[in-house]
Amino acid sequence: MLNIALFGPPGSGKGTQSERIFERYGLAYISTGDLLRREIAECTPLGMEAKSVIDRGGLVEDEMVVHIIEKYLNTHSHSKGILFDGFPRTTAQCYILEEMLAKMNTVLSGMFFLDVPEEELRRRMLYRAQKSGRSDDNIEVINRRLEEYHEKTLPVMEFYAERGKLYRINGLGSEAEVLERLCVEIEQIVKTG
């Protein structure tokens, strides 16, 4: 199985690139953001709890995230592989992911980090807020999300770097240019099996 995770700060383009990769390689697609937004839209207890955390710019608790991912994995256990967008976000989630994949007799093939300077991230998220009206894209929440990212998610890079599974991708340029950089690295993983 080709199991990859797309990683990077908020506004780095994970969602956009994930759509392209998932289509190109025929992978099951897990976006924690999309799954959480669905729970919120359906006004489930989990969704309402997650909404209060997200609206403050925080990260949803590991237990909540794992619950929705396991639910999804159970319905997509026979795919060619899995593309994770927004998971894992903490070192604890890295270990949880290893356990989940081990139960499926597979491992994470690679963690792809979209590297984008912070000022560009702010610009992108403010632009997105103007276009989509997302309540979690205002400057106060954006700054809090970036702080949370630095505090909690940067150790995820170290976790995968130590295992030789971290691939740094320049996240600047057109969507097509970034996708090409990603696909070059993914193809190397596919070739080496």
Image (cartoon, rainbow, N blue to C red):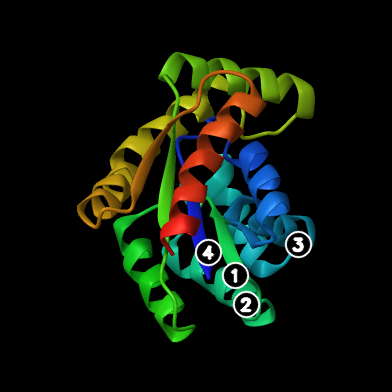
Residue 57 seen in render:
no
> Which of marks 1 and 3 precedes in the sequence?
3
Disc 4 from disc 1: Cα separation: 21 Å
Residue 140 seen in this snapshot: yes
Mark nearest the camera among 3 and 1 is 1
Mark 2 belongs to which amino acid?
A: Lys
The image shows residue 22, relative to residue 45, as above or below, that is: above
Task: Tell me the CA gap for discs 4 and 3.
Answer: 33 Å
Most distant residue in the left direction: 162
> Secondary structure under badge 1?
helix
Q: Which mark is residue 2?
A: 4
Residue at the (45%, 38%) spot, across then down = 8
- Mark nearest the camera among 2 and 3 is 2
Image vertical order of residue 102 relative to residue 149, above or below: below
Whether 142 is drawn above or below 188: the answer is: above
Looking at this rendering, what residue extends furthest in the front direction?
191
Mark 1 or mark 4, which is nearer the start of the sequence? 4
What residue does disc 3 label? 43
Quadrant in the rendering for residue 44: bottom right
Q: Tell me the kind of residue under disc 4.
A: Leu
Q: CA distance from mark 2 to mark 3?
A: 17 Å
Tell me if 19 is positioned left or right of 82 in this view. right
Circle on res. 174: none
Looking at the picture, tell me which residue is in the foreground, 73 or 48. 73
Q: Which mark is residue 68?
A: 1
Q: Amino acid at mark 3?
A: Cys
